[in-house]
Every structure is written in structure tokens, then in C-alpha cells.
Image: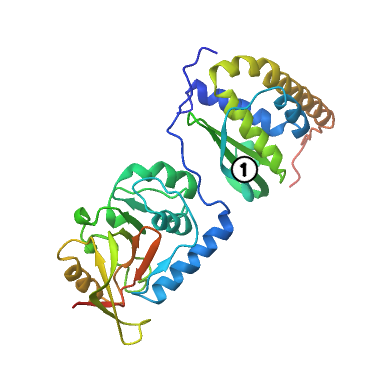
Amino acid sequence: MTQDPNQAQRRHWLGVLAQAAPAELEAHLSRHALPALQWLRRPETGLMMVRGRAGGTGGQFNLGEVSVTRCAVQDDDGRLGVGYVRGRVARHAELVALFDLLLQDDRRRADLLPTVIAPLAERQRAARDVASAQAAATRVNFFTLARGD
Amino acid sequence: MTAPGFCVNAPLLPGFAQPEDDAQRVFRVLLDALSHPGRIHTVPLALEAPAPLATATGAAALTLCDYETPLWLQSPDAAPWLRFHTGCPLVERPAQARFALIDDPATMPALADFPQGEPEYPDRSATLLIQVADFTDDGLVWSGPGIDGETTLGVAGLPAGFWRDWQRNTGHFPLGIDLLLVAGDRIVGLPRTTTIREA
């Protein structure tokens, strides 16, 4: 199921959109004409449990709950755009859903992927690299020379 | 970017306009219906449910079903709509269901095929939403808890022998199933405590 290239691609752009600034998405959206839309699910906020693994490899544990806002929109052809974002900004979820809908249209995708998704993804990657580098600089290595008995 | 087109489904109908308020109003109606068997209640909202579901069936399903309630459908046409709006699991066999939607009573399974509950947990039984043709003024005499003495109400569109099947269902109390009979936007509750006599 995860081998489907469409699914991997969609997962990628949904992730990028969910982490983008709503104002930026709004500016991008204003340059595109929207098709006839119907909101299937208005934005609604709830809690989701985030799970983690100690060290990235250990057993799963519940890290904590995070508020998530979601919504879903559909066009007349039956395409379904979904938006799931962390936090309670309803408009952000709507923007993600609208872009998800537009990106499923083959003609629009050819235009949107390089102009919207690629620059956002590049910037998010750069920001992550900076944060990783800063964290890596504080790394401390522990050595045990002799075991006390 | 040469991937084939994205999966496109038939457009879905929206669910409740105000999910929390509407679900609470419908839940109140369902409570009233089951506390007063044989009395006709009306679902107080205009919901367009996909065929073959009636308004009241769709509203009750959106209200009652969630990810913990296995649902059995007699005909699968409304499955995408119910899956999207409620997230409920759909099951193959009536015996696995907590709720069941029946749009053609003439070909429905026997009532005994649905979960009857367990002696320690009689609530682990199924609730059936059955779409009937119409309600009429007389034809059946209803009695039991929630009814002051007796009341009369007829139900059109149920197969012959249904009420004999129902009598067997009430005989296993506290086990048994509960019914909600639906015609359009009207709904009548029929819990396992109600006995029905054909007039």
C-alpha cells in the first residue's frame, strides 16, 4: 500500500503544507482560481495521542496529546481534499485541504508542485538542518573508563 | 510526475450541518422514541442521506455510530458516506454488528441472527434501524414499559411472520435486540420490553 507513488507524493505535500505558515499559503492560494467546492467536514479541533519510541527503537509509549484541527473539502468530480494540522488554526486546515484538492488535479499539479510545494519544502529542510546543527553542537559523549565495583 | 491519476470517487453528500448540535438533537429524539414505544417521533432536521437511506436512518446512523460500533449494512450503497462521516467499521455478518441498517425488510435476516447480548452484559446486543413503508393508525396493539396501558399503531412494509419473530425476541428478556422503525423523517422505537399483539 505504501508503494503507491501517488500516495507517497500526496503524503509529502500534505506534510509540507501542514508545516507551512498559513499567511504564506493564503498568498499562494490567492493566485489560483478555485473550482466549485463543497465542504464535507468543516474545521473541527480535537486531541490526538502522539506516540514515541525511546531512542527511536524502543517500545512504543504515549508521549502526550496534541491538539489537531482537520477538515475535508470536495469538488464536483469527487476529489477529496483533506487538511490535518497541529494546533487550532481553522483556516490553516482549510488551506491545506484546498491545496490538497488542487494538487490532485493533474494539470494544476504540474504548476503547483514547483511553485508552491518545492520552495516550502526546501525552506523547511534548511530550517531543520540549522536546528539539527545547533543541537548537534551541544552533544556530549560519555566514556566509562573503569567500572566501579 | 508521470504517475497515473489520483483515485477519484463519486462525490459524497455532506453530513450534519452542525455536527455537535444536530447529533445531540437527534440523540434526544432517539431517547424519547425508545422511552415511549409506539409513539411517532420526527427527526428535527433536513438531512439529505444517500440512497437507500431515509432522512431519519441517516441522522440516527450519524448520531449513534463511531469507530467503536461495528455496523452491518443490508445494501452497501451508503457505505462510503457512513465510513467517511462516522468512521465506523463495517462487518460482513449480522452476528458481528452493534448496529444494523435494513432498507428492505422483506429480505432481512432473522432477528435471532443479530447479537442478543450476554446474561452479564445484556447491552452487548444489536440495535436495528429498519426502514418500513409507513405507519398507520391501527393494526397492532403495543404494551410494555413506557406505554400507559396499551397503544395502537400499525406498521406497513414488514414481511409476514415478522411479529412472530419479534415475540420470540421478547421471550429472552433481558437478552434480545432493540429496533428503531423508520419511515421518511419519522421514527418509532421498539425496545425488547415491548410486546406486540396483532389486532
Q: For the residue marked with disc 1, what is the amino acid?
A: Arg
Could you say where residue B46 lies in the image, as x and y percent from the top left?
48, 54
- Image quadrant holding the C terminus of chain B, namely bottom left
Answer left or right for B94 relative to A18.
left
Give the letter of the chain under mark 1.
Answer: A
Extreme bottom residue here?
B149
Where residue A63 appears, as percent x and y from the top left, is: 66, 48
Is residue A36 found left or right of A134 in the rendered image? left
How did the renderer colour the structure?
A: rainbow
Name the residue furthest left: B160
Image position of B164 (left or right of B43): left
Q: The N terminus of chain B appears in which quarter of the rendering?
A: top right
Identified at 65% across, 24% down, the residue is A33
> In which quarter of the view is residue B83 placed?
top left
Bin the neighbour count of mark 1 within 10 Å (Cα to Cα): few under 14, some 14-19, many 20 and up: many
How far from the left and from the top, in percent, is residue A128? 76, 27
Q: Position of residue A67 (x, y in %)?
A: 68, 48
| Residue labelled with disc 1 | A70
Residue sitting at x 60%, y 29%? A100
Reply above or below: B76 against A133. below
**SS at badge 1:** strand
Q: Residue at x 35, y 82 (%)?
A: B147
Q: Nearer the viewer, residue A67 or B138?
A: B138
Is residue B164 in view from this perspective?
yes
